[in-house]
Amino acid sequence: MSSRQNAVKKIVVLATVVMMLVSVSLTGCGTKKPAKPAEQAKPITITIWHSWSGAELDVLNDAISKYTAAHSNVTINQLQVPFDQLKNKFQTSAAAGEGPDILVGPADWIGAFTKANLIAPIDPYVDSDFLSHYVKGAVGQVTLNGKMMAMPESTECVAMVYNKDLVKNLPKDTDSMITLADSLQTGDTYGLVYNTGFYFTAGYFFAAGMKLFDANNNSIVSQGDGGVKALNFLKKLSDDPKIIAANDYGKADSMFKEGKAAMIINGPWAVGDYVKALGADKVGVAPMPSFSVTGKPFAPFVNTKDFMINANSDDAHKKAAMDFVKFMTGKEIEQEFFEKAKHIPSNVDVDTSSDPIVNGFLEQMKNGVPMPIISEMGAVWDPMQTAIDSVLAGKATPEDAIKTAQDAINKKIQSTRNSSKK
């Protein structure tokens, strides 16, 4: 066969193949459905309640802006509620089938909220790989009866915060703290402003030997003399005219920001604003002085600040809320909380090693007492605060006050247990 004939044959074969492909293509056109456009995510609004202010609120606002910019279908509404009102407000709303999708609060609320079915377990939304980025102790703090009931944002305790311009040598025990405070008082500037709320004073009750519960979770605060020793110490502070010791967080906080207090007891949530008011070079953090009466170290509650999910939220809102919570506890936002608000992050990917303020709180935590998250803990706060207030006001002796507190706590606990049986 000639080369010309071979060329003609190749052309004929090629033409036949092309015609077959066209035929198949045209046949398919009659049955193939057009591709669907990418499905748009449905708009959804989630609500968060919190008590953040100052630097903490700045971080939250920034996080919301960043998140909604990347998730155009999501709207996030927030409500700032004073901390002393937040628990009751959520409890009332959630019990009525309402409330926010996300609540920001401490771990000691978990027990009561779980018992009342007000918050939902978050186990369906997290896995072991995700949780490997978080402090095990923080995850353990929010786990109750084998279920993870919240996502820890930060770990916290109270410690001594001091003005470096006024305090040159840190006191080692409470006797030297009082001596130093008295020497620094001049005009309207005080050496020590001490918030006598039970959360802030608990470290000295524990240093004195007081215990909260027995093995059956009944109160034993009046057993032994630990409670009496701690109340006598607080009365001594209160009676000292050169020291301000009162259950007034706002006053103590304002005085330190204004440079009118050399030492204060507070937590990492406040230090961002102190640095902003006084300058980073003037703010120091160290463990509280040991209790001179017993020689034991100050042992504060160690707690987590957490994101909780409302049990009333439907599946879509729970999923959307947890996605935002994961963003809030991711490295980027945890870094902002650390740098701007001095939070001690639960995310281990954030490096805090170079920060002396955070290291001061971490040093204090070594002697801390984990905050109980059992529901019985909710019965402790008011009676213990009443005991402190009544002793400082001279209305009760330490012995009577702590006995009355124990009776009141156990009465509340029993009442709650009886109600749950009905």
Image (tube, rainbow, N blue to C red):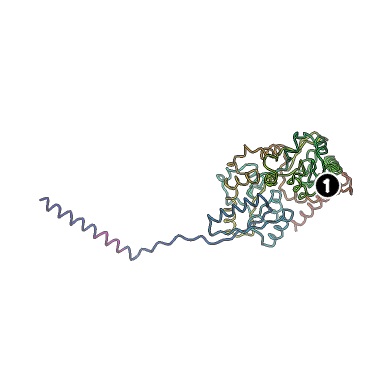
Residue 151: x percent and y percent?
Answer: 63, 49
Q: Is residue 85 magenta?
A: no
Which residue matches tag 1? 388
Q: Dot 1 lies on which element?
A: helix
Is the residue marked by circle 1 packed among few (<14), some (14-19), or many (20+) residues within 10 Å? many
User: Horizontally, is 336 left or right of 232 in the view?
Assistant: left
Residue, far left? 2
For badge 1, the amino acid type reads Ile
Q: Can residue 1 be seen here?
A: no
Left or right, 386 with respect to 113, comes to right
The answer to which quarter of the image holds residue 117 is: bottom right
Expressed as whole percent of the image width and height from the top left, the position of residue 173 reads 79, 35
Name the spot of residue 247 as percent of width and height, x first: 80, 49
What main secondary structure does the magenta stretch of the protein show? helix
Asked if the stretch drawn in magenta spans residue 20, the answer is yes
* Quarter of the rendering occupied by the C terminus: bottom right
Q: Residue at x 57, y 56 (%)?
A: 320
Outermost residue, bottom side: 30
Q: Taking 253 as reference, is 288 above or below it? A: above
**Camera-side residue of 39 and 330:** 330
Start-end of magenta stretch: 19-27
